[in-house]
Image (cartoon, rainbow, N blue to C red):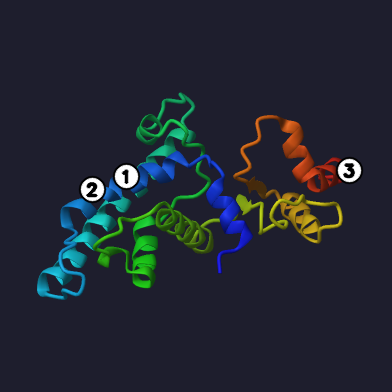
Amino acid sequence: MTTRYRVEYALKTHRRDQFIEWIKALLAVPFVIHSQPTGVFEEGGDVGGMATEAHRRYAEILKDVEGMIDDHINHQNDKHKLPSKLKLLVPSAGPFFTTLPLEAAFKYQDSKRYISSRRFVAPSFNDVRLVLNSAQVMAVTRNHELQLATFDGDVTLYDDGMSLEPSSPIIPRLIDLMRRGIMIGIVTAAGYTTPDLYHARLHGLLDAIATSPL
């Protein structure tokens, strides 16, 4: 049964992440070239070869993006502030706090979701987001200390359509992370155009920050 949250989410206009959309567009090319959507139940050698070649091409693309992120991080630390290639291609790209092993993350997700074996559906926005999330977890747990933690708002920090109230048990935990020098990001698809509406949604945390000796 479709939940109320899914219905309302589908009816709203959401601001798409341009970095994810860009990666999705890159992955669409090998899908179009190598997918063979002929015969729903056909399982010949060509189908297996298609999946193998698509996997290789997807992994290559994400390895290249991985290198562009490394270059972007180097430009972040450059006192001359010259734009990276990634910044030129995706102007909305912000700072990266860790390197992202996208190739390894894709191979992991591909083993779980069979992205390369699909013949009718190209890699989606959610597929790319899962790869990025997996890469972030890999990066943090391998070689880096955590510098930034991001959380979805609705249905994660608070119920759908509700606010982050002062009584929420998540607030002391967020404050503790900030006290350790970890930056906190809260993501919402609300799309408000004025700051007062965001304040109303997050007032419990904002008030706690204002009174906390961070």
Taking the image as shown, residue 30 lies to the left or right of residue 149, namely left
Q: Quadrant of the C terminus?
A: top right
Compare marks 3 and 1 and give the one earlier in the sequence: 1
Taking the image as shown, residue 212 lies to the left or right of residue 35, namely right
Taking the image as shown, residue 188 lies to the left or right of residue 172, namely left
Residue at 82 percent of width and 52 percent of height? 165
Q: In the rendering, at what x and y percent does residue 149 appear?
A: 62, 52
- Disc marking residue 210: none
Q: Which residue is mark 2?
A: 29
Residues under labels 2 and 1: Cα distance?
Answer: 7 Å
Q: In the rendering, at what x and y percent does residue 18 appear?
A: 44, 39
Residue 177 image-quadrant placement? bottom right
Compare marks 2 and 3 and give the one earlier in the sequence: 2
* Disc 2 element: helix
Q: Which residue is mark 1?
A: 25
Residues 2 and 176: in front is 2
